[in-house]
Amino acid sequence: MGSGVQKRLSSLTKGEVPPITSSSQSEDIKHSRSVLNSLFSGALAGAVAKTAVAPLDRTKIIFQVSSARFSAKEAYKLIYRTYLKDGFLSLWRGNSATMVRVIPYAAIQFCAHEQYKRLLGGYFGFQGNALPPIPRLVAGSLAGITATMLTYPLDMVRARMAVTPKEMYSNILHVFVRISREEGLKTLYRGFTPTILGVVPYAGLSFFTYETLKKLHAEQSGRLQPYSYERLAFGACAGLIGQSASYPLDVVRRRMQTAGVTGHTYGTILGTMKEIVSEEGVIRGLYKGLSMNWVKGPVAVGISFTTFDLTQILLRKLYQKG
């Protein structure tokens, strides 16, 4: 036995590295795979959801940044006029910029949410189980903040492309170059503060509502996995609650982002709110387009959460078979 120990020690002195335990290696691989799964599933979820509602999203932004009165009839007229003037695909104008933003945004947000759940679960002793309400809310808010901080200039570009004619900005790179030259690099982060203030309740309540509904469903039905239509319904509720809570800040954000092309000079959050309210009122100003968001938002969030969950399940099954 002594000679065995000596042989082992002599081999280590010659530069051999002791083998990593299989359990540690397995955990690292499992965690890396989980991160990659979340990134891919989140990217796909964001792309599918945003493309599905792009015409409604573009119409909502146009009303948000103008003083024109919103109604379902006027929204329909705008969509129809755009279709007649520029063609069917013009309804998706700015969607390429949306994809450039939403794919990394959704990938980071969903992946960050999974990691924050894991970290908070370990900290509060709920690893592998559903988090309590407050940590569940915190995980969603932190995920939204993380994704927004890393992708904000792309959201600015997307808003500019949505409200301007094709002649003004030819492509995404042209928007970056022109804004930088004519308005300065700081403009790329105009509206960042109201965005962060809005994303805290939006992302927090969206993830919180979806996770809570899934937890309650599992307790009541005895099924760990809801059906696809149930996931859509849970996601729709999450989108409705999250977007309604943060909508005024979304309007303020859009006004500040597009100030350079609409002739306004919005400076601060409160100043922008006061100007909107004085010119258009509270409901018709700060909540302009909310009724369209009640159609678009739940659909987009429902599709997003459902696509993410189903893609995660599919990838896990493929790994198990492989």
Image (spheres, helix red, strand yellow):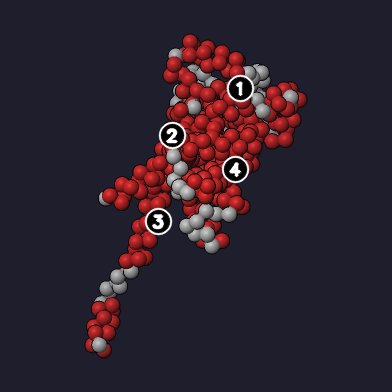
Which-is-in-front pick, marks 1 and 3?
3
Q: Upstream in the sequence, badge 1 or badge 4? A: 1
The residue labelled by disc 3 is 31
Is residue 111 in view? no
Q: Is 252 or 302 nearer to us in this picture?
A: 302
**Do the CB atoms of the residues marked 1 and 2 lie less than 8 Å apart?**
no
Nearer the observer, 265 or 274: 274
Query: Comparing marks 4 and 2, which lies closer to the viewer?
Result: 4
Using the numbered discs, state the Cα–Cα distance from disc 1 to disc 2 in whole angstroms.
Answer: 23 Å
Q: Amino acid at mark 1?
A: Phe
* The quadrant where residue 59 appears: top right
Check if mark 1's residue and mark 4's residue have beta carbons within 8 Å: no
Considering only order in the chain, which callout, 3 or 1, is on the residue closer to the N terminus? 3
Judge whether residue 248 can be spotted in this image.
yes
Label 4 sits on a secondary structure element that is helix
Q: Which residue is mark 1?
A: 63
Q: Find numbered disc 1 in the image and state the secondary structure of the residue it sits on.
A: helix
> Circle 4 sits on which residue?
205
